[in-house]
Amino acid sequence: MTLRFIGTTSDEGDCPTLYEIEGTDEILVQGDRETDPEYLVQLRDVKPSETFVRVPRSLLARYAPRAEAPQLQAFSSIAHLFREFRHTAWRLETRRGYASDRRSPKWARWQAGEDIANEASVWLENVAEQTAAGKRFERVRLVDAPPTEGQRFLLASAPGNVAAGEDIRNLTRTQAEDVRLPDYDFWLFDSKIVARFAFDEDGTTLGVYVTEDPAEALAACQARDAAWHHALPTHEFARQVASTV
């Protein structure tokens, strides 16, 4: 079982916070332990294993899920959204590498020193079509210091996406942690549909959890705004990385 950060009303990175316990319909609440005897004596049916924490009402009002936990479904189930979204498709990429990249024919060519930035693909054709219609494809990628092999591959291939119309920006992992970005990947469509990825240990996509829960959408929008504010455009970030090698 793993925990997924949902949201917090703390500005300093401490409690209170809500987490989802993945694979269950339960929420873990982090807050200050209640120790006031006057309150504790009024609690009912307390089991020895139970404890109690305080959280502000605003945390629950803002982030508490309002729908059942979504079920894992195949990534192909959201393929239509990349054509049918109305104004924005935004992605957060947090991993140090993806199995889909390592299995791509471009991977071997990149390792051989070839330029992989200008190769045609169905993905780029759709990006060009949608952006020509006035829509926006955007994403922020987290990058370690130094970048991993998988991250360097994405930096090398990104100019082709950018040329097709996709705005790709990069953010160091340290900066992402400072602004408390989520540690999971997701797509956000039109600021209301969230498709959160599930991966195995090798970085293979297992599927996505799709939801329109307002709390989930709000958390995704806040992560997008924070990431976009601090992230650098691909060409600028790649230049910085090159200068440190």
Image (cartoon, rainbow, N blue to C red):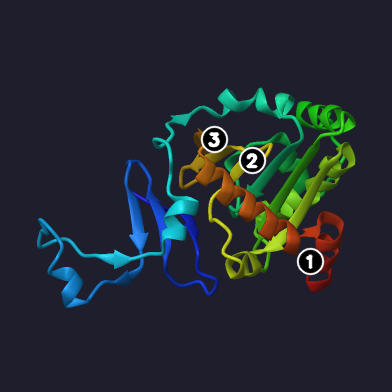
Give whichever of 190, 228 is nearer the camera: 190
Disc 1 designates what residue?
241
Q: Quadrant of residue 234?
A: bottom right
**Which label number is shown at residue 188?**
2
Q: Is residue 217 above or below residue 134?
A: below
Q: Secondary structure at mark 1?
A: helix
Give the Cα distance between marks 2 and 1.
28 Å
Amino acid identity at mark 1: Val
Mark 3 residue crowding within 10 angstroms, few (<14) / some (14–19) / many (20+): some
Mark 2 or 3, nearer chain start: 2
Q: Who's the residue at 64% across and 40% down the image?
A: 188
Q: Who's the residue at 38% across and 51% down the image?
A: 2
Mark 2 or 1, nearer chain start: 2
Quarter of the C terminus within the rendering = bottom right
* Residue 46 at x, y percent in the picture: 12, 59
Mark in the foreground, 3 or 1: 3
Disc 3 designates what residue?
212
